[in-house]
Amino acid sequence: MHDSGLLLAIESSCDDSSIAIIDIKTKKLIYHKKISQELEHAMYGGVVPELASRLHAEALPKILEECRPYFDALKAVAVTNAPGLAVTLVEGITMAKALAVTLDLPLIGVNHLKGHIYSLFIDKETLFPQTVLLVSGGHTQVIEVKALNEMKTVASTMDDSFGESFDKVAKMMGLAYPGGPVIEKLALQGDAKRYKFTIPLQQKKIFAFSYSGIKNAVRLAVEAGSEADHADIAASFQEVASEHLVRKIKKYLVDHPPKNFSIVGGASANLYLRAKIQEMLKPYGATLSLAELKYCSDNAAMIGRVAVEMYEAGDFTPIAELQASPRAPL
């Protein structure tokens, strides 16, 4: 179904309030705004769910007010309903339901993880199949994607996520939140070979990831050292955290050579990781796809891009069934 008109998408799965409007026929982004809560959560060293919920309640209506000129052309309303923080998902869902009732529009509930995959295709057509590495504050997984509803997770983390480990290491050093960009910047000044942190799961054949061991080793190094050692610790940590991903994926690719490989999620903005993956893919001649840096972290543009595909497939969610599913898988 190729329809002319617009689709409004809302994202509130964690600490970013965002709304986007996409042209259904051309898949072009017409409007996009995101209000980050990073400064408000920084003093706590991480996201405080109740505070995030309250900030969404303030920010989302302000953004929506800017979208009023587009209301007459809307054909559907989409919203992230899984996974995420329950109290923040509800803020977006409540707004989506109110809009759907007021404007008499169908609803589309979108899985946030699919959103990250479709961040690759904002303002463009999809390209499948893709072997996708999703790295964010809450997730680290490898997904084989053939189509919108043909996605299979082939590996995931057994404990902390890649992005979460960066946040925790930054917190150990008394550095700012979010930790990813801070640790990446600090690592540029350090010696990545100074600390011999053990690469996790080296002797295990399972295709999975683990960051609890590295995190503990870093904690011991921070406690034993001083602030003068932080750059070397950051560089050594980033090296091992990335090498762990690369080694596990490399073994997987031997039997599953990729045609197209992509990195998505907030932590995909890490330039060191991008370079390591690019190097890993050379023997396969695979195309590496990356979302624009501004679309790596949570945003409504990626949610809207998935929703356009769902709209065309007639995949709508009855208003009574649209609920927050904080731990829903892909």
Image (cartoon, rainbow, N blue to C red):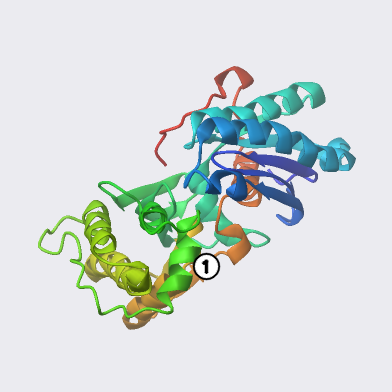
At mark 1, the secondary structure is strand
- The front one of 312 and 197 is 197
Question: Along the horizontal axis of the image, is 181 left or right of 30?
Answer: left
Question: Along the horizontal axis of the image, is 322 left or right of 199?
Answer: right
Say which amino acid is labelled 1: Leu
- The front one of 35 and 43 is 43
From the top left corner, tell me how far across and down residue 256 is, in percent: 28, 65
Q: Residue at x 46, y 74 (%)?
A: 287
Residue 315 showing in the rendered view? no
From the top left corner, tell me how far across and down residue 146 is, in percent: 43, 54
Q: How many marks?
A: 1
Residue 54 showing in the rendered view? yes
Q: Circle 1 sits on which residue?
A: 290
Q: Residue at x 79, y 38 (%)?
A: 62
Label 1 crowd (10 A; few <14 / some 14-19 / many >=20): many
Question: Along the horizontal axis of the image, is 139 left or right of 13?
Answer: left
**Which residue appears farthest toward the left when viewing the image?**
203
Q: Which quadrant is the C terminus positioned in?
A: top left
Quadrant in the picture for residue 206: bottom left
From the top left corner, tell me how far across and down residue 177 is, in percent: 50, 53
